[in-house]
Amino acid sequence: MFKKINKKMHASAGVLVLVLLLCSFAGVAYAAFVDKGQVLGSTFSVGSADLKLLRDLSLGADGANLADEIQGPSFSNISSNWTADYLVKLYNNGSSRVTVTTNSDYLTANDPDELRQLIYVEIIEWNDANSDGTADETELGVSYGRDTIVKWKTQGFSLGSIDAGAVKGLVVRFSTGTVSDTKQGAVGIFDFEFNSIGE
């Protein structure tokens, strides 16, 4: 009886070893047919931001008409309730859409009488529909805000977006409220800048 049980156990163990060997070979055979696909040499190019100013507002955005800096306006005989417009066209010479902001920039030494506290600036969207470089009332759009030159420096204005290869026209409207007699003959010099950030 023990011999029969022992033979059955040997037979069962033999079958188990055979099954394990077959599984191992099947695994080896399966591994022999595994393959993979690869994507090689992926290239990522970051878009460029290159904001330009148009020199002549009645001309297009060709290379000779584009500048990084242009001469600002010169206003004289400023008095109470004065206003004057300065027109600007920005061109996105980069390869991607950009968000634009603007700030004034000045040294307090260039404004000893603190005209920056009295002069206001308002930035207005301008669509030069007839491309003549002058702003008609019908071409004016939304106002991006109005504040003093001081706030223009510290807080700035957000001017929305410009697509690659597109032009954005702006009216920079300067104005005053009350200007006291103590400011007669005062002179202030201010820069302002437009900054672009890729979206």
Image: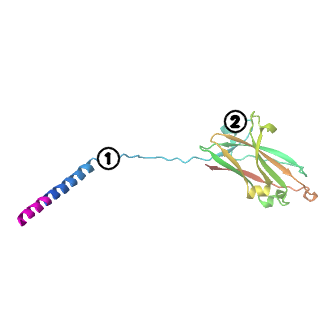
Residue 49 position, x and y percent, is 62, 47
Name the outermost residue toward the front.
1
Query: Relative to 78, does residue 58 appear above or below in the rendering?
Result: above
Q: Going 50% across and 47% down the picture, which residue do you hit?
A: 44
Residue 94 position, x and y percent, is 61, 44
Magenta span: 1-12
Is residue 151 highlighted in magenta? no
Name the outermost residue toward the right.
181
Identity, as a three-letter code, of the amino acid under mark 2 = Gly
Query: Residue 155 versus residue 92: which sits nearer the camera?
Result: 155
The majority secondary structure of the magenta stretch comes to helix
Under circle 1, the secondary element is: loop
Residue carrying label 2: 60
The colour scheme of the drawn protein is: rainbow
Query: Residue 74 versus residue 23: which sits nearer the camera?
Result: 23
- Name which of mark 1 and mark 2 comes first in the sequence: 1
Q: CA distance from mark 1 to mark 2?
A: 57 Å
Disc nearest the viewer among 1 and 2: 1
Position of residue 167 in the picture relative to residue 4 (left or right):
right
Query: Relative to 187, does residue 140 appear above or below in the rendering?
Result: above
Residue carrying label 1: 35
Residue 3 visible, this orientation: yes
* Contact check, label 1 and label 2, Cβ < 8 Å: no
